[in-house]
Image (cartoon, helix red, strand yellow):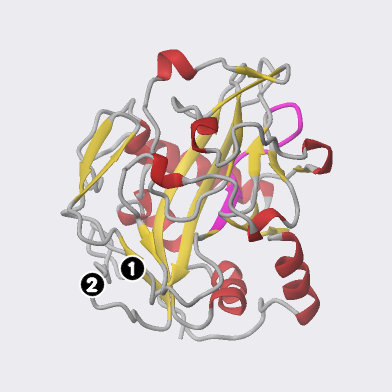
């Protein structure tokens, strides 16, 4: 695809992003378009003929990287509305290294406060390795609302400006125990971490996020928001009885970052997946790290659309 510059972030928007650690929401699809996409993708998720990982359908890992086999998601991660904005943050050479669906059905607990830099908290090994002389690590998350995200059904929460200081040591690792960690109440809020207790990673066990400074990210279906994974973020519980919330997050880094270095598997949520079919997707420019696995086509043989 040809770079148009139509969706580039302005200097003011970049200053806002640098200060707050997030920017948006931006509208990518109308509510009607998103409803149609959601319907098609929901049906395709059940078809695992081309899915990148062999794992039980009820595993959280079954949601991983479906942009590698579902055409609508293959297209989504390459949309110029997303990628042109990312170029202003990450530079011209950008890869999508992971995507996943994050559902929150009625009655579901919130997600606890967390930050991610190396993403090794569950796998035991760094999944991302940035050049050692660079200020930032982590990833840029593009979180798209497949349904409305409200304060009642579990929208995201951010604490602006917290992306500069990691309050967690991911190398400590987490133990997956969904029975123990489900329905954890913290400061009178039901807020766990998908079968993990993220507090185990705190550098200071007595530290608490300044929740009084938290901002609720209310979004319409079809909108997306861009934020650094090192920004303190969480989500509210879904206190409704009839309003499921579904988000789809695609994660991006500069292509000079090493992805899944020196490993053939990923361990998370009590399961293991093989990286045999895995590959990063170059969405802009070119790949600069020779050790990265790269896919130029999805698992159906359809080419990804790199922005040039």
- Residue at the spot x=42%, y=13% of the render? 179
Q: Position of residue 126 (x, y in %)?
A: 34, 54
Residue 187 falls in image quadrant: top right
Please count the marks in the image: 2
Q: In this image, 55 relative to 216: left or right?
A: left
Say which quarter of the image contains residue 108. top right
Q: Check whether the beta carbons of the residues at disc 2 and disc 1 lie within 8 A of each other.
A: yes
Tag 1's secondary structure? Answer: strand
Residue wearing tag 2: 291
Magenta run includes residue 149: yes
Q: Is residue 20 above or below residue 42?
A: below
Q: Residues within 10 Å of mark 1 (few under 14, many from 20)?
A: many
Report if residue 49 is visible in the image: no
Badge 2, how many Cα within 10 Å: few under 14, some, many 20+? some
Q: Position of residue 307 (x, y in %)?
A: 46, 80
**Label 2 secondary element:** loop
Is residue 140 part of the magenta span, yes or no?
no
Magenta segment boundaries in residue numbering: 141-153
The residue tagged 1 is 258
């Amino acid at each position: 695809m040809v770079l148009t510059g139509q969706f580039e972030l302005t200097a003011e928007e970049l200053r806002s992003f640098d200060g707050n650690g997030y920017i948006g929401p931006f509208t990518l699809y109308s509510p009607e378009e998103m409803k149609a996409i959601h319907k098609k993708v929901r049906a395709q998720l059940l078809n695992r003929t081309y899915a990148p990982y062999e794992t039980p359908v009820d595993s959280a890992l079954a949601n991983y990287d479906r942009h590698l086999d579902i055409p609508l998601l293959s297209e989504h991660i390459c949309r110029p509305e997303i990628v042109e904005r990312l170029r202003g943050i990450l530079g011209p050479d950008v890869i999508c290294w992971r995507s996943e669906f994050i559902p929150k059905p009625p009655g579901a607990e919130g997600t606890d406060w967390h930050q991610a830099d190396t993403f090794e908290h569950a796998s035991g090994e760094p999944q991302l390795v940035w050049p050692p002389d660079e200020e930032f690590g982590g990833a840029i998350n593009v979180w798209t609302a497949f349904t409305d995200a409200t304060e009642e059904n579990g929208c995201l929460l951010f604490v602006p400006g917290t992306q500069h200081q990691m309050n967690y040591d991911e190398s400590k690792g987490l133990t997956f125990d969904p029975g123990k960690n489900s329905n954890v109440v913290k400061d009178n809020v039901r807020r766990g971490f998908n079968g993990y207790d993220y507090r185990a990673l705190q550098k200071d066990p007595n530290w608490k996020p300044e929740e009084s400074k938290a901002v609720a990210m209310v979004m319409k279906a079809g909108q997306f928001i861009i934020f650094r994974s090192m920004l303190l973020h969480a989500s509210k519980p879904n206190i409704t009885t009839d309003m499921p919330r579904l988000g789809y997050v695609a994660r991006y880094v500069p292509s000079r970052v090493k992805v899944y270095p020196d490993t053939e598997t990923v361990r998370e949520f009590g399961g293991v997946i093989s990286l045999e079919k895995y590959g990063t997707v170059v969405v802009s420019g070119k790949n600069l790290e020779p050790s990265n696995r790269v896919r130029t086509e999805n698992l159906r043989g359809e080419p990804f659309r790199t922005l040039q």
